[in-house]
Amino acid sequence: MRIDVLTLFPELFETPLRTSLLGKAVEAGRLTVGVTNIRDFARDRHRTVDDEPFGGGAGMVMTCEPILAAVESLRGTNSCAHVVMLSPRGRPLTQPVVRELAAHKDLVLVCGRYEGVDERVVGLLHADEVSVGDYVLSGGELPALTLIEAMSRMLPGVVGKAESVDTDSFADGVLGPPQYTRPAEVAGVRVPEVLLSGHHGAIARWRRKEALRLTKERRPDLLGACTEQDAELLREIEADAAGPGRGE
């Protein structure tokens, strides 16, 4: 997979692209990331990339020409790329969206700054606008890194155990279950006995039930159409809540 990032601050990508699983994916050639400075395509000697908004208002707006020229410079290396604009008004970045974008062979990520990007850029590039959350950052660089990291986990060979991806939060539409490791007791609190039982069927059922419990408590909006087994577990969860304890 090839990803080209257009940004005014290429230095923000240097360390993350050399670190942890993302760095290993790049080093192994499973992921290629090119970082292009939009300012290099400004037409004046001051390398200007922004201007005052038409109609007045606070702040500055990124101009069309440097961004369009930067994209054009990629012709031949990423000519058929799907263009993504990191924008607070874009569609929410969810795990299904991550999987969808990771299916593209080539992507161009455009990182906005200031009060935003000239609207014509979105139209001319047929950009797919994506948002990482309902909050405002100073630019699209950190959202771009978030997207790159999330997509890299979808690539074969990046995560050591492929099943780790399948059990991540949101991988199957719900939050992940609680996780525990050694020692079995810390400050008087023991790991749930079922996890020590060695009974794989019981462990799988417990994990699914706890995943549903957490989702019901913290993100009930994620509970859409349920399987018959999930519906049964949710009924048990409701019965647990009505009783004296959690019943596990």
Image (cartoon, grey):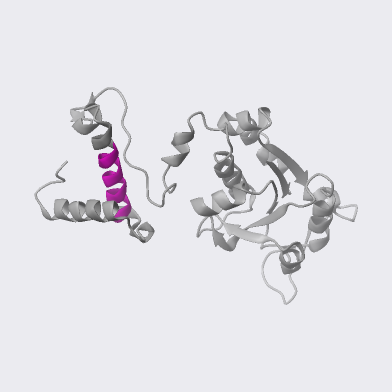
- Asked whether, in this view, residue 113 is left or right of residue 182, the answer is right
Taking the magenta stretch, the answer to whether it contains residue 95 is: no
- Asked whether, in this view, residue 165 is left or right of residue 241, the answer is right
In the figure, residue 207 lies in which quadrant? top left
x%, y% of residue 230? 28, 52
Q: Is residue 192 visible?
A: no
In this view, the residue in front, 31 or 121, is 31
Q: Is residue 183 above or below residue 120?
A: above
Q: Is residue 38 above or below residue 168?
A: below
Q: Is residue 216 visible?
A: yes
Instruction: Please tell me whether the stretch drawn in magenta is mainly helix, strand or loop.
Output: helix
Count of numbered marks: 0
- Asked whether, in this view, residue 11 is left or right of residue 162, the answer is right
Kindly give the residue lying farthest to the top in the view shown. Answer: 183
In this view, the residue in front, 83 or 5, is 83
* Residue depicted at 41% across the width and 52% down the height: 173
Kindly give the residue lying farthest to the left in the view shown. Answer: 244
x%, y% of residue 160? 51, 28
x%, y% of residue 64? 79, 62
x%, y% of residue 247? 14, 44
* Residue depicted at 58% across the width and 54% down the height: 137
Part of the protein shown in magenta: 204-216
Q: Quadrant of the N terminus?
A: top right
Taking the magenta stretch, the answer to whether it contains residue 205 is: yes
Q: Quadrant of the C terminus?
A: top left
* Residue depicted at 23% across the width and 27% down the height: 196
